[in-house]
Amino acid sequence: MARSSAGGALGRAVRLVASAAVRGAKAGVRGAAAGATRVRARAGTARAARTGGYPGDFDGPLTPAYAPDLDGEPDPGEVVWTWVPFEEDHGRGKDRPVLLVGHDGPWLLGLMLSSRDHDVRPGPPDERWLDLGTGAWDSRRRPSEVRLDRVIRVDPRAVRREGAVLDRARFDAVVGSLRARRG
């Protein structure tokens, strides 16, 4: 009995994963038709990024770059969805939108986004957030904020999808605030 129960559970799991993949592909097609989203699927790369190899957050001199190109590859100036390690434990993390702002060797450099209003519900006192507004990276078009006090490294192979190109004016505002914060 346990065998058929396990087989039924496995079948349900396979159907759920397949259903999620179809929904994701349909969302990618809709977004691509609008010129906003490209879905990328690279088996195992996100898992590899999660389980090791993260060199830590970037704290060196930052040379921002704006070079968006919705070509299926992540570029500075784009908001992408990727796995972001928690500060306190790089082995754990969360999939979230990230604004790419530059490079560090093979790594992309990014600033994480949040739909939480940090003016209303602030986080720790040393966190600094800038209102970014809405964009195609959030399917519900919620206002986003970008975190300025933490620059994360992103493995380009671990980017799940490109969410949108951030317009140059908002990118420059983020970079100006980032420079004022980092010196």
Image (tube, rainbow, N blue to C red):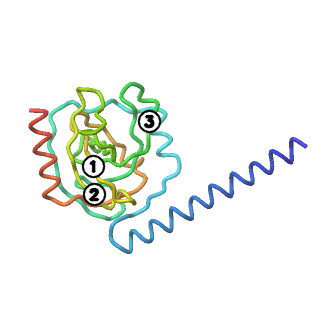
The answer to whether residue 2 is left or right of residue 115 is: right
Q: Residue at x 16, y 47 (%)?
A: 174
**Mark 2 secondary-structure assignment:** loop
User: From mark 3 to mark 1, how far is it between C-alphas?
Assistant: 17 Å
Q: Residue at x 30, y 43 (%)?
A: 112
Q: Residue at x 57, y 58 (%)?
A: 20
Q: Residue at x 38, y 25 (%)?
A: 88
Residue count near mark 2 (Cα–Cα under 10 Å), binned few <14, some 14–19, many ≥20 = some
Rendered location of residue 46, percent (x, y): 47, 44
Residue that mark 1 sits on: 99
What amino acid does circle 2 point to? Thr
User: From mark 3 to mark 2, how far is it between C-alphas?
Assistant: 24 Å
Which sits earlier in the primary sequence, circle 1 or circle 2? 1
**Mark 3 secondary-structure assignment:** strand
Residue that mark 2 sits on: 134
Residue that mark 3 sits on: 93
What amino acid does circle 3 point to? Gly
